[in-house]
Image: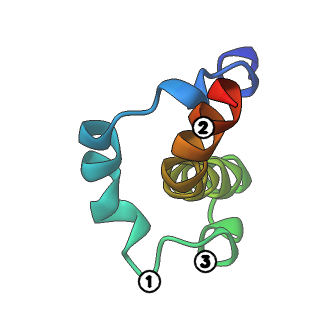
């Protein structure tokens, strides 16, 4: 659990995101679908999807943070 909560999400790479796209884009890979089978897997699914979303948002925000630091 500690490795997930302390995961360095700022260091996610495009290569890693590309690897998880197989799962994230699968319409069956949702917390609701996994919840009945395995609640741990359902929560891990939610975390993986959150990391995917964070990476995409961070790609937009990162250049703005850099510009702010310069200003």
Identified at 36% across, 62% down, the residue is 23
Task: Report the residue marked by disc 3.
Answer: 33
Q: Label 3 to label 1, Cα distance in Å?
A: 9 Å
- On the image, the x and y values in percent for residue 11 come to 48, 24
Q: Earlier in the sequence, mark 3 or mark 1?
A: 1
Task: Report the residue marked by disc 1.
Answer: 27
Give SS at disc 1: loop
Q: Is residue 11 above or below residue 18?
A: above
Judge the density around disc 3: few (<14), some (14-19), many (≥20) Cα neighbours within 10 Å.
Answer: some
- On the image, the x and y values in percent for residue 29 come to 48, 71
Q: Label 2 to label 1, Cα distance in Å?
A: 37 Å
Which quadrant: the N terminus? top right
Q: Earlier in the sequence, mark 3 or mark 2?
A: 3
Identified at 34% across, 51% down, the residue is 20
Give SS at disc 2: helix
Give SS at disc 3: helix
Identified at 64% across, 54% down, the residue is 50
Q: Label 3 to label 2, Cα distance in Å?
A: 41 Å
Judge the density around disc 1: few (<14), some (14-19), many (≥20) Cα neighbours within 10 Å.
Answer: few
- On the image, the x and y values in percent for residue 45 come to 58, 55
Q: Quadrant of residue 4?
A: top right
Task: Report the residue marked by disc 2.
Answer: 67
Asked if the residue at tag 1 contacts the one at tag 2, i.e. Cβ–Cβ closer than 8 Å, the answer is no
């Amino acid at each position: 659990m500690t490795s997930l909560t302390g995961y360095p999400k700022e260091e996610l790479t495009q290569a890693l995101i590309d690897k998880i796209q197989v799962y994230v884009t699968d319409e069956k890979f949702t917390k609701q679908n996994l919840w009945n089978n395995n609640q741990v897997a359902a929560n891990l699914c939610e975390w993986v999807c959150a990391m995917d979303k964070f990476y995409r948002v961070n790609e937009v925000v990162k250049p703005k943070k850099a510009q702010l630091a310069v200003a």
